[in-house]
Image (cartoon, rainbow, N blue to C red):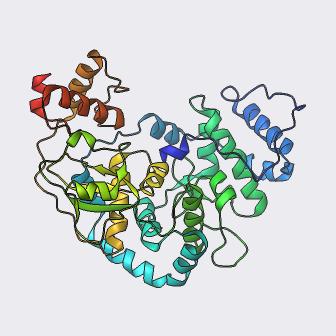
Amino acid sequence: MIRTARFFKTLTFLALATLPASAPALAQQCGGNFQQFLAGVKQEAVAKGLSASAADRTLNGAQIDRKVLSRDRAQGVFKMTFLDFSKRVISGYRMNNGAANMQKYASVFQRAEREYGVPAPVITAFWALETDFGAVQGDFNTVNALATLAHDCRRPELFRPQLIAAIAMVQKGDLDPRTTTGAWAGEIGQVQMLPEDILLYGRDGDGDGHVDLKGSAPDAILTAAAFIKHLGWRPNEPWLQEVTVPSTLDWSQTGLGKARRASDWAAAGVTPRSGQIAGDLPAALILPQGRNGPAFLAYPNFDIYLEWNQSFIYTTSAAYFATRLAGAPVYNQGNPDQGLNDAQMRQLQTKLSAAGYDVGKVDGILGARTRASVQDVQKRLGFPADGWPTPALLAQL
């Protein structure tokens, strides 16, 4: 699964020298004759200090993969509710295998937490959701996928650096351009990392001298830990905590971006279902399906999940999964109010947009801007302002 937040950031390629200011601009950044495009990629790679032979080994034989373009054009939108999605992805199989893998690789996880401050359940939850602990890593040729998306003129500024990073991996002996496969967007291995990220944060966990995220669980575990630390993980702090909320709460104060001290939430009657509230830490009270569904305090480390993937439902599910692996009980699913179907959600977004709200694209997705708009209009119309749109709200609009 593409981690959109960092996928749409071009990281500084620290592993390579920067292109000299005097170097001529390459004429063909994308599109046009594919072989001429690859020649330009080779020219840029060599200018950045990579060997011509590594570029040739990587690019000779590269082909446009039409299935990659089809996947890119037909990306699904995330419209499942939190309860539906979390129940689907947090299975008994994943819970059992997560526990077994944390025990099997206990020494590696201990090293990951010692060196990077990231606990085993956090890494394990990502490992499970991304590839089922390495069982489903994707079967697209990585070089072909990256070359296809770099040549395509939709987002060349994002994929061209990844193709050059793949050349660097070939030069290091960490990628075979003919046999290395992964996701359709070029992500590799058990925790699905892009080549630039592997070069910057890849770690040799098994001591064989290579970073092999496809075949080595220790490499994947330490690399994930290094990357999560880079995103800003705060050691020895919680990330998500299920809570029980009083019916008298001011719902307009809930939601991401509205953090207050956890002790203030406690004073307002919010109580943890397990453990203790981290009183001095800032925390946002999030309600994935409104005031009558599950409720969580999201601490600063929850922001790291949003860096990994911008989908609120995916990240909340991943963070909750990690709490389960750490010993938290199954959530109280409550009795959420009826939500909107796809057509109703689009109708709601259209009405909100016409009323002057910025909901972004009318796509049927209850994203951050739509939630914020819903919360504002709920408060204005006298509804409980919990950010969860209902048929009654739509009818009122």
Q: Is residue 255 left or right of residue 334?
A: right
Q: In this view, does 307 lie to the left or right of 145?
A: left
- Residue 53: image location, x then y, percent: 85, 52
Please report the residue visible at 10 percent of the width from the left and 25 percent of the height from the top: 395
Compared to residue 94, the image places residue 379 above or below, namely above
Of the pair 54 and 337, the residue shown nearer to us: 337
Q: Give the position of the C terminus as an image quadrant.
A: top left
Q: Residue at x 11, y 32 (%)?
A: 391
Residue drawn at x 41%, y 59% as measured from the top left: 281
In the displayed structure, does residue 140 sit left or right of residue 63? left
Position in image of residue 325 (x %, y %): 35, 72
Query: Is any atom of residue 106 visible in this view?
Result: yes
- Identify whether 8 is placed above or below 263: above
* Residue 301 picture quarter: bottom left
How many numbered markers are drawn? 0
**Residue most extreme to the right:** 22
Residue 45 drawn above or below residue 342: below
Say which quarter of the image contains residue 240: bottom left
127 vs 30, nearest the viewer: 127
Q: Can residue 62 be seen in this view?
A: no
What residue is rendered at 47% in x and 84% in y? 104
The spot of residue 2 in percent (x, y) is 48, 48
Quadrant assignment, res 317? bottom left
Residue 176 in the image: state x and y as whole percent: 69, 60
Between 382 and 25, the residue placed more toward the observer is: 382
